[in-house]
Amino acid sequence: MAASCDSLLPLVLLLCLSAQAVDRSNFKTCDQSAFCKRQRELKPGQSPYRALLDTLELSNSRLSLQLINDNNKVRLLLELYRLQGNMTRVKINELKPLKPRYEVPDVLLSHPITEALSVVAQDENSLVVSLGGKDQRLILSAQPFRLDIVEGSQVLMSLNSRGLLAFEHLRTRKDTKSESEQATGQENVEQQTDEDGQIKEDDDKPGMWEETFKSHTDSKPNGPTSISLDFSLPGVEHVYGIPEHADTLKLKNTDGSDPYRLYNLDVFQYELHNPMALYGAVPVLISHSTDRTMGIFWLNAAETWVDISSNTAGKVRVISSEAPQTDVRWMSESGIIDVFIMLGPKPADVFTQYASLTGTQSFPPLSALAYHQCRWNYNDQEDVKTVDQGFDEHDIPYDFIWLDIEHADGKRYFTWDPSKFPQPKEMLQGLMDKRRKLVAIVDPHIKVDSGYKIHNEIRSKNFYVKNKDGGDYEGWCWPGNAGYPDFTNPEMRTWWASQFAYDQYEGSMENQYIWNDMNEPSVFNGPEVTMHKDALHGVWEHRDVHNLYGLYVQKATADGLIQRSEGVQRPFVLTRAFFAGSQRYGAVWTGDNAAEWGHLKISIPMCLSLGLVGISFCGADVGGFFKHPSAELLVRWYQAGAYQPFFRAHAHIDTPRREPWLFGPENTALIREAIRQRYALLPYWYQLFYNAHRTGQPVMRPLWVEYPDDFATFSIEDEYLIGKDLLVHPVTDEGATGVTAYLPGKGEVWYDVHTFQKHDGDQSLYIPVTMSSIPVFQRGGSIICRKDRVRRSSSCMENDPYTLYVALGSQGSAEGELYIDDFHTFSFEEAKQFVHRRLSFSANTLSSRNLAPDSQFSTASWIEKIVIFGGSQPSSATLKSADGTESALEFEFDSTLAVLTLRKPGVNAAADWTIVLR
Amino acid sequence: MTCLHLLLTLVFAVSLGTPVEIQRPRGVPLTKKQFYEESKPFTCLDGSRTIPFDRVNDDYCDCKDGSDEPGTAACPNGSFHCTNAGYRPMFIPSSRINDGICDCCDTTDEYNSGAKCENTCKELGRKEREVLQKMAEITKEGFLLKQQLIEEAKKGQQEKQSKVTDMQENKKQLDEKVEALRTVKETAEQPEKEAKERHLKAWEEQKAAIRLEKDKAKMAETFLELDDNADGFVSVSELQSHAELDPDADGTLTEIEAQGLMGGAEQVDTSTFESVWPKIKDKYHSESQAEEPAPVETPPDEVKEPVVDNDSEPYPEDDISEEEDEDDEDEDDYHEDDDKAQPTIKTPEKTHEDEEAMPPYDADTQALIDAAQKARDDFEEAEKALREMDDQIRNIEKELSFDFGPDAEFTYLYSQCYELTTSEYIYRLCPFNRVSQKPKYGGSETNLGTWGSWSGPENNKYLLMKYEQGTGCWQGPNRSTTVKLTCGKETVVTSTSEPSRCEYLMEFTTPAVCQEPANIDPSPHDHVEL
């Protein structure tokens, strides 16, 4: 829930009263952001930068040389690394900055492993470096400076080919210059000017030393510090990523509009289809063509704008003389240029490459993948109990009930409102008795109140972010006046984590988990509803670390949950703000959406975009946060949400109640069915998250990820794949009577999971729909394990048997996986306590084989039933167990649909077995 | 754990304290026992197929209706029967079998999950009996009270009905009286009007004579003043000394202009001056001290008949509540009607009281006026009485028109109010009128809804009251309140809550919803299947 409006703040009220949609004037356009305006005024042309080849230094894995700006004689240091897994890192910093420039810490897993570089050719104006692999080389041109990455004769990517490298070097303020030259700056200035003559300072432009937006002034003591670099992608028409924006999956050309903005902001009632910044930022762009998939990871946590320009934008795709090309330009307000170029070549390779840099999705406890019931707010313990009972009365499963800000005592997080929640443990125990859980919100703004322990400790430990004058920074948020702990400080994070210990957080129990909201950070009375850029985090300005703040909040919270269980239990923490690497700490949701069909639709590309850049655990508020959904919209949203990774219903405090049973028995039944489908598929979701955790492959995927050669899939965003085996085309139109789904894959077959009907791939298929329809297809050639015995919560299904859905491909074979562990601890990782099996069907034989022989785990679950689509009727089915015993299985065959059902194999899910059909 | 071979279970049903063994598959109610015969193949209860009996409760769902697995969780649509001896038997969805949660008080649903369940049926049974007993007592007493309420309501209704009838009768008489008095009034007013007019006319004539007199005197005086040389003539030059008489207002009175005023003559004598005087008298300034300007004709004072205002008319009760008590906490406190409060009333100033007031009416006229006034007073009084009567009738009729329940048992709530004080607010329910909320420690009242309708379920709409169209919420609907009525000896608001923003729920006990106790001694203990 956002800095929406509440009665408490007349200021915010003013801000919001008129707003039915976002009040754009609260947020900067590129023109209003001084550095963006300066940078964008720079047009493509000859770069003033020249590489000084004689400064070349080459160690085994690092190449460095100096660049000089011939206009002002400022020197930069270029570093090039070849990284393991087909990646190149390009770093550019000032050779001798007046003071250090910020380099983003804590995002990379570790120092990336480098590989040997070698110079294979050199002349007076260029340098050729071998990148290994398939004849991949990097060509460095000295004047004008540019980098080209080539494979054979093909240019994959060029840097600074449009001459937009711009690096605003640190300088002393003119009015104070003489003074500082004599004092501290003297040495630096001397060093910089001794070789090529005087540094010619650019003329001051507006906003270099001070910038005002609305009533807020940014003091900018360091002056202009922005950086920019352009990347050209020949042969590329499709680029994706750089979330978070409420926009299409395929990024748009920004020539005629603002660039895409990355600056974590609490946007009240955001608008669809525009490049405005939202709550989170992942500066990763993925390019894709039928030839190759690549990625650009721009590691910078300051305000960033990304311009996309494509020579084919807006044109019908015809064979033209001009080869398609997309140009991308990154602009950041401070820090350094630190870019990771991921060379693919396949989508899966890019995901692996990016995961090797920033890590993979955390593996959530199974229950976190189940259904979540949230509302701002469940009023009191009685309310929680009533809603909990409501689910049982209506036989609808759920795992988590959520408490928003009203649960705390005066918005003092880590406390409970004494009149509404006098006995939190009693409430939590009641939920535990039903094997259910609770999430309580803990936001990072801390009420300034001398009677509040958390505040007192943070203040006394000097852990608050400071304002430019060195005092504790204070801003307005839900509790009124609030301080903001400096989460960039590791000591602060350690202390924060310790606050989740059961003996610190009174009333908490092991089935209580945490939600971090407002961690952009949201400051109601701050510029653009966030923190002043000249606020200080130790020696760094907020400007430098802004986009990283939310990641740290979630990290510290997740660490707290791990520590409270002494490292045993996997945490579950939801965050609204995020950055590259946030996938390691939990789930993300798309913030304060609205009960509108457009918002339902956009939830798909928004989560797909996040998945492409590592954040798989994504969802949108089911039903829409603001406004009141119609019954139809709510049902459709449940149906769509049931097939998105994070599945939570949520609602604004001013909306009427909307628990699933409040819309009449018919709609209750439809919602129940959608949630049940989710629960039945939990084994598949769980296995995919395990896979995402191990390999970095997204859970929810655009079609092109699995069908990279099929141009028709490149812009599809109204359907998607879960893993590679389920294709979902949710109904997102009011009054829809049908949808047209594209089934990809020449030679593939797809089975409607509800009707078992078989369809050929490589076609657009019109599917008539009713209110109960959720068009989902299983790929021929896949085996999906489900638990069809849906119970009250996922925990209740722990030991239930599996049903295997074997969808035969056109070759009559199929493959799948089954993953089982205790569903909530780290034992899978630390003690290899899990079951991971390969299920494969070929030549009329279905078998289960151990994929991890060194793992061990015993499960009570067994194989209840096997359903085979697309086969023929056998005369017998024989089960061979691991001990060699054979038994005949009964079966049924539906000849009209060609569905064979094997009755009760009964083997343990962890065992080896084979079934032979004859 | 592939199959559960335990197909049959021994079930102990407690009947009047005597245990009886009944063999049947787990989860099957006694009423369906006959369908599950161990010696025969089992036919799904929907008749869809027949399976060997060893597939009943074998933890695999064979029947579409779930009937082959009453004791396992294998079928998605199955249901499990717990006997719950000592308490109430019940069905639970079969998905709750062995899910680790104790659902049946006799623990039979958790036979293989490791859940540690305790048999709580006896305790539950005891508690339930206590509750039922208490409930029964309350119902019994409440129902008696309800009978009284019905009696009273009936009586009250009859009284009101007959009162209305009486009043209708009285009203008819009043109507006639009003008409008669109207005639009397009109008859008395005619001579009054004529006499008054006569009097006024005489006075007007008298006033005109006096004015003429005064004018003549002034003319003579002016003549003398103008005739500076006292030759008995006013000459052009003498007139010229009075520049204010300048007809074209250029500041000087020329000779020609003066001559013009004097009708072309060089001089005029007193008698000729009579024709000059009207032309100059309005402008003329006396040479002696400034005399008061010539009298302006004043219209006779309008005689203001007192406007009959309706302040005697009482408001119908519910109109008051319609007034917006709109001081909403999160609303801006802007009241646009603040500034239209006091239009500056201009009291017409008495400009001059130059002449004597009208002489008093003569005795005859006064007598006529007095008579007419009395007739008016009598008429007005009668008319007011009639209006009051009308209002009373209307109010009673309105009350009689409310739906006070099938036996008018809710009548007694009418025009009553009930309060509940919580930690923050005082809630006030005035049945059939409105619900409101007032902060305990000062602040204005918020309307949570005015009487809408009965809105209980179809079989008994009198279990819920709906109050609607209360004060509006920011970005939200108008406040509304649902009042849930339960049987109780007392008429009390027992709780209030706001389950959804601006939608309130109020619990209210009243004997009026107590149902007739079904049997004299409800004892669930005796109710055992068999």
Image (cartoon, coloured by chain):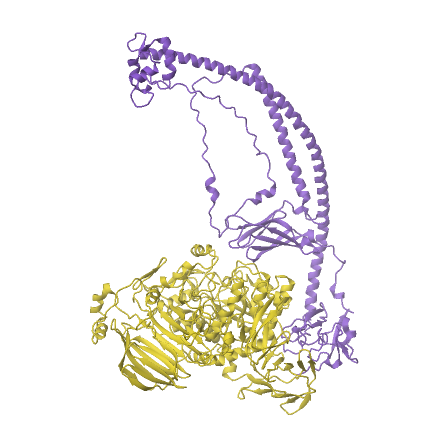
Chain colours: A yellow, B purple
Q: Percent x, y for residue B205?
A: 49, 14
Residue at the far top in the pictured view:
B231
Give the image location of residue B459, x and y in percent.
Answer: 71, 56
Answer above or below: position of B144 versus A599. Answer: above
Q: Please indicate whether residue A686 sits to the left or right of residue A395 in the image.
A: left
User: Camera-side residue: A749 or B134?
Assistant: A749
Above or below, A28 relative to B147: below
Farthest-out residue, bottom: A884
Q: Nearer the viewer, residue A528 or B468?
A: A528
Give the mark count: 0
Inspect this view and state whether residue B241 appears.
Answer: no
Compare residues A562 and A742 and report the one nearer the observer: A742
Quadrant in the picture for residue A553: bottom left
Give the residue displayed 57% in from the left and 34% down from the top.
Answer: B311
Q: Does residue A901 appear to the left or right of A471 in the view shown?
A: right
* Image position, residue A265 (x, y; %): 42, 65
Which of the image's four quarters has the C terminus of chain A?
bottom right
The answer to whether residue A7 is seen in the rendering is yes
Residue A541 percent location from the top left of the image: 34, 68
Residue A813 relative to residue A262: left or right: right
Q: Residue at x 57, y 45 (%)?
A: B322
